[in-house]
Amino acid sequence: MIAPDGERLGPYRLLSRLGAGGFGEVHLALDPEGRTVAVKILHPHVAADATALTRLAREVETMRRVQGPHIAEVLDASMEGARPYLVTRYVQGRPLSAVVSGDGPIGDDDLVRLACGLAEALTAMHAIGVVHRDLKPANVILTDGEPVVIDFGIACALDSPSVTASGAVLGTPGYLAPEVLEGAEVGAEADLFSFGATLAYAATGRHPYGTGPASAVGYRVVHHSPDLEGVPGWLEPMLRECLLRDPAARPSASVLLARLNAAPVVQAVTPRARPAFSAAAFQDAAGVPDPRAAGRRDARVKDAPIRGVHGREVQDREVREAHIQDAALRAEVAGTRGLTTREWRPGRRPPPGRPSAEEAREHRRAVLHRRWVVGTGLLVSLAAAAAERPLPEVSLLLLTGYGLAMLADGGIALFSRRNRSRMIIDVAGAAGTVALWAVLGTFFSTFTLALALGTVVFVLVAILVAS
């Protein structure tokens, strides 16, 4: 059942439907403070599984601790009621799958930024003890030339027999690791396989294990080698290691990130010193041990202390600031390529040169005020000029009333000391209206003015109805 636009779900007001997946439908929404967020409403057959919801509610506490510029952070969740939902940061951009299918393979510096960004995102997730389990091109949003990973941890949390039997697809063939397809125990290594497949698709424009029925693609994943023809030489060896069938032979996200940072092509894209991201930095900020040393995911989540982000505020801030500096550094090299985003990122100020939300609202109010003064002035001058000969008292009343209204508005702006330019616009509008009235009354007949007034009123009514 599709939620109607404008409906409220908890404290969130749904604006428009963005799409749907195996677990639920996603809506663009506003939080109580008027900021954009993404709300994923779970499908009824998923919400009916009490065990899966309990597991997801427990995992949300861990998922909320995952922070970083390349991750759509989990902000809130409600697993109660008829329609459980999950709230994440809204990322304005295009999925990697749409970019590649529409524009072709990712190349040169963009591929460097994609590889480094995804590696940083996996490092942050794995350090907290979260496994994405469904990393694929559709779950990577490209915004401002940088990748942002969405929907992390949901597939693992909802991996329930009843959910699967109801029709929810836990992963995408060709990007799921062999151990997932074989039903073996799944850990962070599965995300490295998905990383390799996703980067191979981005670099070549082809699915590394081909297309066709899910069973055929899954068979190739388990028994065949990936198609990496066309992958740049600096990236191919790392992707081959990530796509090894043995999970233990794959590099960890932190090792992969260190190797990427040391690659000459990466250093050429980011000539200034790049912050040294490592699993240890994220572990120190999160207060959890190394994921690979601590065993598989279920044991890590069970044993890891559930502490809020504020418990290690200083260290968390240092890690986030390092991420932001790194992203800004690569974006500066990228120049103006990529998309311009306007989404809210928790705890961050707008980049230099971009107005804050309050400044944008003030600018919008000023523009609307100027348009209102000009539009009403034109309407009043036309009406007063048309009524000057047959009804001079009405003409005088219109001009006097409009002038007093503009003077009152300008006086309020003057005494409030917030926007004195508004007073100037009001006075200029009143003077301009009187001047236009005099010109129109001198050069045009009453019939012509009445016809013009009727036309303007008709256009305004049509615009209002259309709006």
Image: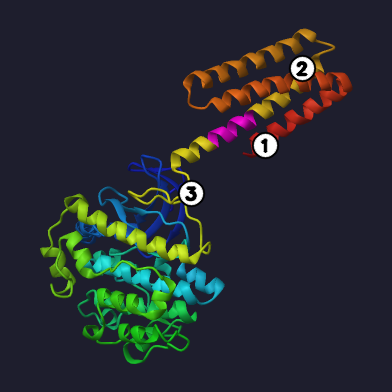
- Decide whether the magenta segment is chiefly helix, strand or loop: helix
Crowd band around label 1 with a 10 angstrom C-alpha radius: few (<14), some (14–19), many (20+): few
Please provide the residue range marked out in magenta.
364-372
Q: Earlier in the sequence, mark 1 or mark 2?
A: 2
As drawn, the residue found furthest toward the left would be: 303
The residue carrying mark 2 is: 384
The residue carrying mark 3 is: 353
SS at circle 3:
loop
Please say if 303 is above or below 444.
Answer: below
Left or right of 414 in this view: 136: left
| Type of amino acid at the residue the image marks with label 3 | Gly
| Type of amino acid at the residue the image marks with label 1 | Ile
* Residue at the image position 81 percent from the left and 13 percent from the top: 388
Please say if 193 is above or below 460.
Answer: below
Please say if 121 is above or below 180.
Answer: above
- As for residue 366 lying within the magenta part, the answer is yes
The residue carrying mark 1 is: 463
Residue 127 in the image, given as x and y percentages of width and height: 21, 67
Q: Earlier in the sequence, mark 3 or mark 2?
A: 3
Quadrant of residue 410 in the image?
Answer: top right
Residue 71 in the image, given as x and y percentages of width and height: 34, 61
